[in-house]
Image (tube, rainbow, N blue to C red):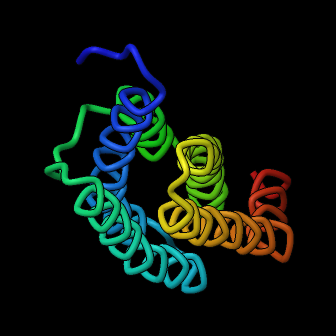
Amino acid sequence: MDMSTLQDLYLDELRDLLNAEGQIIKALPKMAKKASSPELQQAFQSHLEETKGHVERLNQIFEKMGEKPRSKKCKGMEGIIEEGKDVMEEAENEEVLDAALIAAAQRVEHYEMAAYGTVRTYARLLGDEQAARLLQQTLDEEGETDKKLTALAESGINVEAAEAQSDA
């Protein structure tokens, strides 16, 4: 794709995000299934539904731009998810696995927050305040998910993983 304008870059980044969200939609059910903590399972299931809404917002932006919602392979998200898969296979007990799942999920959230913040800024610079609002809404939800994951980690999951280590 030719990227000679900020508009070109913006469209490219939106396509990358669309693919990233699709990858997340595939990964979250697997993460929920692997989690032993009911609260963590619920957090992943809730975020799955939220992520489907993120895709809908991206599709609205493409439609308003007169563009087909085509995705571009997001190699960054692919790497983050692959790393998460590796950790899920290597964790030797449920408590450590849950802590690892939170760490993997937070890497995903931080990647998304960086990407959504960037495209929101592009939308504003390009004068598309409606898209900027939609992107900000998603950015806010990603931040809330990150906070929920931190609270789960700090309120027990990481503590349980530490206790499992001292019992070993």
Considering only vertical position in the picture, is 121 above or below 150? above
Q: Nearer the viewer, residue 91 or 22?
A: 22
**Above or below, comparing residue 30 to residue 111 in the picture:** below
Which quadrant would the N terminus be assigned to in this image? top left
Please state the horizontal and vertical placement of residue 148, each as a whole percent of the image: 72, 74
Give the residue displayed 36% in from the left and 16% down from the top: 3
Residue drawn at the location 61% of the way across and 72% of the way down: 141
Any part of residue 92 in sight: no
Determine whether, in the image, residue 119 is placed left or right of residue 166.
left
Q: In the image, 124: left or right of 8?
A: right
Relative to residue 22, is residue 140 depicted above or below? Answer: below
User: In the depicted view, which residue is nearer to us: 168 or 28?
Assistant: 28
When asked about the image quadrant of residue 21, the answer is bottom left
Please tell me which residue lies in front, 60 or 107.
60
Viewer-side residue, 77 vs 156: 77
**Residue 32 % position (x, y):** 41, 71
Q: Is residue 41 visible?
A: yes
Q: Quadrant of residue 159?
A: bottom right
Residue 50 in the image, given as x and y percentages of width and height:
44, 77
- Residue at 64 percent across and 52 percent down: it is 106
